[in-house]
C-alpha cells in the first residue's frame, strides 16, 4: 500500500539568488598569475578538467558573472585563495 503525503506537508524553500563573482578579486588573482583574459584562464583551468565553455559561461570579459561551483573550487585551489574572497556578498 502506498501512502501519499498531502501537498501542504512538503516544505517550500525560497529560491536564493545566484552568487556573483567578486570581479576585483578575480581580476587581481588572475593578473598576478599572468592571466589577463578568459582565454588565458580557460587554458590554465583546462589542465585541471574545467572546460573552456564553462569558463566563458561563468565570466564576462570584466570577470563578472554567476559563480560556477566547479570554477570556484578550481580557482580557490590553483591560486590558494579563499572561497569567500572570490564571491561577492
Image: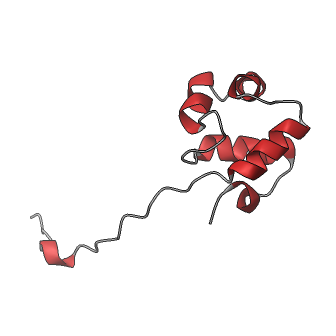
- Between residue 4 and residue 49, name the one nearer to us: 49
In the picture, which quadrant includes the N terminus? bottom left
In the picture, which quadrant includes the C terminus? bottom right
Tag count in the figure? 0
Instruction: Report the residue at 69% width, 28% height from top.
Output: 38
Q: Is residue 35 left or right of residue 50?
A: right
Hey, which quadrant is residue 60 in on the image?
top right
Q: Is residue 5 left or right of residue 49?
A: left
Q: What percent of the width, then of the height, locates residue 21? A: 63, 51
- Between residue 80 and residue 62, name the one nearer to us: 62
Q: Is residue 87 left or right of residue 82?
A: left
- Between residue 84 and residue 3, name the one nearer to us: 84
Asked if 4 appears above or below 8 in the picture, the reply is: above
- Between residue 47 and residue 81, name the one nearer to us: 81
Q: Please identify the residue farthest to the bottom as the structure is shown.
A: 9
Q: What percent of the width, then of the height, locates residue 41? A: 74, 29
Instruction: Report the residue at 66% width, 57% height from top.
Output: 87
**How is the model colour-coded?**
secondary structure
Asked if 88 appears above or below 11 in the picture, the reply is: above
Q: Please identify the residue farthest to the front as the structure is shown.
A: 62
Q: What percent of the width, then of the height, locates residue 22? A: 68, 54
Amino acid at each position: 500500500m502506498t501512502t501519499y503525503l498531502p501537498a501542504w506537508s512538503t516544505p517550500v524553500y525560497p529560491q536564493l539568488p545566484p552568487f556573483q563573482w567578486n570581479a576585483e578579486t578575480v581580476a587581481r588573482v588572475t593578473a598576478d598569475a599572468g592571466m589577463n583574459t578568459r582565454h588565458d584562464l580557460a587554458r590554465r583551468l583546462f589542465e585541471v578538467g574545467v572546460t573552456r565553455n564553462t569558463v566563458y559561461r561563468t565570466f564576462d570579459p570584466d570577470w563578472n558573472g554567476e559563480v560556477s561551483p566547479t570554477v570556484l573550487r578550481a580557482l580557490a585551489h590553483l591560486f590558494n585563495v579563499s572561497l569567500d574572497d572570490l564571491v561577492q556578498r
